[in-house]
Image: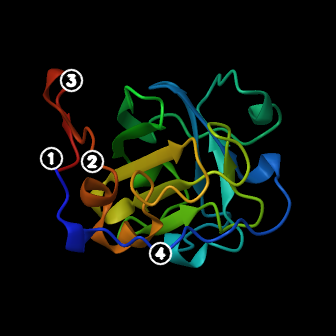
Amino acid sequence: MRRKRQDLDTRPTPDPTGAASDATTVHVASASDFSLLLPGRQGELVSESEADGVAYCASGSSAPHCAGRPAMQQGFIRAAAVQQDPNGAWIQVTGCIDPSKSTLDPSDAGGQLDVRFPDGAQCTFGGYGASFIELIEPALNRFCLRCCRDHGDQVNCNSHRDRLGCENAVPGTYDFPEIGVSCL
């Protein structure tokens, strides 16, 4: 689907804050091997966790930065799908969550974590300074993470679309009828 010109906010992606850190590094390797930034405190709203978000890894993740990092609770990820741009500009994971299997408030409308917050946030795809956008939407039982190869990629990782939700900011799979899971 082509985006209308007025839908694109081409302001630059904010520069990263702080030094790169394993504690705030996300990655996407497969639908069962990825990590997400999540609030660091019980019941903290996603929108309030920009300062203290922590990377949680899928159980058994092979990513080096996941060694010694907290794992997502069993059952938190209900279903996930990975897609990659044919030209290698981005990789993403989208899917459904069960907020009751985490420290998230299930009534939280959610929020965005990205290359700017928390400090040192990065995605291994593209490296430190490259664009990425992640939204966690507990009240809608969904999540999305797209990592872009390039710094300031406001076409593929538009950090200014965060208020539009996962389906608009990171179009992907949010319905898994083959396994009876939907977060739509």
> How far from the left and from the top, in percent, is residue 68?
83, 36
Residue 42 in picture, x, y percent from top left: 61, 66
Q: Outermost residue, bottom direction?
A: 48
Callout 4: helix, strand or loop? loop
- Give the number of the mark in front: 1 or 3: 1
* Cα–Cα gap, marks 2 and 1: 10 Å
Dot placed on the residue nearer the N-terminal end, 3 or 2: 2
Q: Position of residue 44 (x, y in %)?
A: 57, 73
Residue at position x 33%, y 59% from top? 169
Mark whose residue sits in front, 2 or 1: 1
Q: Which residue is mark 2?
A: 171
x, y percentage for residue 58?
58, 32
Q: Which residue appears at 65% of the width and 22% of the height?
A: 60
Q: Nearer the viewer, residue 37 or 124?
A: 124
Q: Are marks 1 and 3 in contact (CB under 8 Å)?
A: no
Point out which mark residue 1 bears. Answer: 1
Q: CA distance from mark 1 to mark 3?
A: 26 Å
Q: Is residue 35 left or right of residue 159?
A: right
Q: Disc 1 versus disc 4: distance between alpha carbons? A: 22 Å
Q: Which residue is mark 4?
A: 11
Category of crowding for the residue at label 1, using alpha-carbon neighbours closer than 10 angstroms: few (below 14), some (14–19), many (at least 20): few
| Callout 4 amino acid | Arg
Say whether disc 2 or disc 1 marks the residue closer to the N-terminus.
Answer: 1
Q: Are marks 1 and 4 in contact (CB under 8 Å)?
A: no
